[in-house]
Image (cartoon, grey):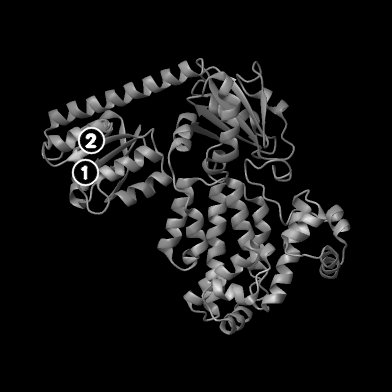
């Protein structure tokens, strides 16, 4: 079925179009109908859509604006327009922008509608055939399959059990992933692969991604590596998602070539999203649209979560902190962040802390974490969050549960623990990054706080509390324990 999204600002019109237009007769299923462009974009974040049918004249975001955004973000989606009359200027402009066809809402004669929908279905089928032929021509009639190990014991020998794989080279691409180039696979291959890779205990050991529209052979490995490092984190759903994911390297290339503003971090660091639902939804939307580098995203979220967790009065986040190392994909991180957000908001509201002051304290904590090397004084930090030094000092101790100096000492030692267990940086560099100008003092303080020398801690301590195991991570940050 052709999964269709219907957009019109008039509810009565939408209801009529749903019942009158011959969707199912021509292989189309309306999976959602909404009243505006912003709502449509939210649906596109959650649903796979093949065809967008949108009105042109709507309040707020116009149909043309929506078409532009969809063509930028989702170039594989086909678009048809709704219009109230034969306004050829509008229709010609829409056709010039590459829309598939147009539906005149005042001309709903059954015979004409059947003819129109038959034409649209034929054009869709023709576009799909041409796209598939182009993909086969570019890739020599082959497609690319990625196999991503989800357990530490996953080895490529397991992949030879999968039909149509044994006779081809299995190429490592790093980060626990392997790729195979194969001829176009039959429709039943997904189920065969799922069955072949399932363990005796029925556990899920592999994620499989079929990448259509593969590039020419000498570019395949590079494209697979880029996809693995950035995109699989966002498309994989290890909860209720399919074990075999279908995606398009053509869409990946269009995404990479689009001029996207990376402003998600500005929304994140405003902390308005902690209390305001609209700001929260906007933050999630921007992360999903902009797909920041997974390492940068996960490290930012993890560092801020740890910085807040170190506040002595707010230790209810311990179970969430323990879960962090098991988060592999963006859907998992998003669910985790929603819970963390709820706990932060509840803790701050229980103190009767005004939202404006709470946001200022969260910004201050992030400054503490982000600018540790700068050794910010309490006066400098209070100025950054636009509070007097005295009021900042009193508020910080009341909300965080520690004085500014005691909190910074705790934060510096915790950051040193992370760097010692997850990096190969030398001790001098770690001391510097944690804001210690005197390495001897750093070593002495570290022993006082942990009961171990820096050297012994690096050799003996587990990294589990600090590891980030997102899909696509390099090196030691690859797979969850078997």
Question: Of the numbered discs in the image, which one, if any, rests on residue 94?
Answer: 2
Is tag 1's residue or tag 2's residue first in the polypeptide sequence? Answer: 1
Q: Position of residue 96 (x, y in %)?
A: 24, 31
The one nearer the camera, 253 or 247, is 253
SS at mark 2 in the image: helix
Q: Position of residue 278 (x, y in %)?
A: 40, 62
- Tally of marks: 2
Work out which quarter of the rendered image holds the C terminus and state it: top right
Q: Is residue 377 left or right of residue 70?
A: right
Identified at 80% across, 54% down, the residue is 462
Question: Of the numbered discs in the image, which one, if any, rests on residue 425?
Answer: none
Mark 1 highlights which residue? 56
Q: Is residue 174 left or right of residue 351?
A: right
Q: Quadrant of residue 223?
A: top right
User: Does the CB distance between marks 1 and 2 fall below 8 Å?
Assistant: yes
Q: CA distance from mark 1 to mark 2?
A: 9 Å
Residue 340 vertical placement versus 313 (above, below): above
């Amino acid at each position: 079925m052709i999964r269709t999204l219907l957009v019109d600002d008039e509810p009565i019109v939408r209801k009529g179009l749903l019942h009158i237009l011959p969707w199912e007769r021509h292989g189309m299923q309306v999976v959602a109908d909404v009243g505006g462009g912003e709502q449509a974009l939210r649906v596109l974040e959650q649903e796979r859509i093949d065809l967008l049918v949108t009105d042109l004249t709507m309040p707020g975001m116009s149909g043309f604006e929506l078409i532009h955004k969809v063509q930028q973000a989702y170039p594989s989606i086909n678009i048809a327009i709704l219009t109230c009359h034969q306004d050829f200027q509008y229709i010609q402009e829409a056709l010039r922008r590459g829309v598939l066809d147009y539906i005149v809402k005042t001309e709903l004669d059954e015979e004409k509608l059947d003819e129109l929908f038959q034409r649209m279905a034929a054009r869709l089928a023709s576009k799909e055939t041409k796209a598939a032929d182009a993909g086969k021509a570019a890739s020599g009639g082959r497609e690319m399959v990625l196999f991503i190990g989800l357990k530490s014991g996953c080895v490529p020998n397991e992949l030879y059990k999968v039909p149509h794989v044994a006779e081809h080279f299995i190429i490592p691409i790093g980060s626990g992933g392997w790729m195979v180039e194969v001829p176009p696979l039959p429709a039943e291959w997904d189920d065969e692969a799922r069955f072949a890779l399932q363990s005796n205990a029925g556990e899920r050991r592999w994620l499989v991604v079929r990448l259509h529209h593969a590039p020419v052979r000498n570019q395949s490995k590079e494209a697979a590596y880029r996809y693995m490092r950035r995109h699989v984190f966002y498309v994989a759903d290890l909860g209720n998602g399919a074990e075999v994911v279908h995606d398009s390297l053509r869409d990946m290339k269009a995404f990479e070539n689009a001029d996207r503003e990376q402003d998600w971090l500005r929304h994140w660091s405003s902390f308005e999203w902690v209390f305001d639902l609209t700001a929260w939804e906007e933050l999630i939307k921007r992360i999903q649209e902009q797909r920041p580098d997974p390492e940068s995203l996960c490290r930012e979220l993890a560092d801020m979560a740890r910085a807040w967790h170190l506040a002595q009065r707010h230790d209810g986040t311990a179970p969430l902190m323990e879960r962090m190392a098991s988060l592999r994909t963006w859907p998992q991180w998003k669910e985790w962040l929603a819970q963390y957000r709820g706990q932060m908001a509840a803790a701050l509201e229980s103190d009767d802390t005004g939202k404006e002051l709470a946001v200022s304290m969260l910004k201050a904590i992030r400054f503490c974490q982000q600018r540790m090397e700068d050794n910010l004084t309490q006066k400098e930090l209070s100025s950054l969050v636009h509070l007097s030094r005295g009021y900042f000092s009193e508020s910080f101790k009341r909300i965080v549960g520690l004085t500014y100096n005691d909190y910074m000492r705790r934060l510096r030692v915790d950051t040193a623990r992370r760097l010692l267990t997850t990096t190969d940086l030398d001790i001098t560099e770690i001391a510097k990054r944690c804001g210690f100008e005197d390495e001897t003092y750093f070593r002495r303080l570290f022993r006082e706080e942990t009961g171990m020398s820096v050297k012994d801690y690096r050799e003996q301590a587990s990294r589990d509390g600090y590891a980030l195991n997102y899909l696509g991570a390099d090196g030691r940050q690859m797979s969850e324990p078997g």
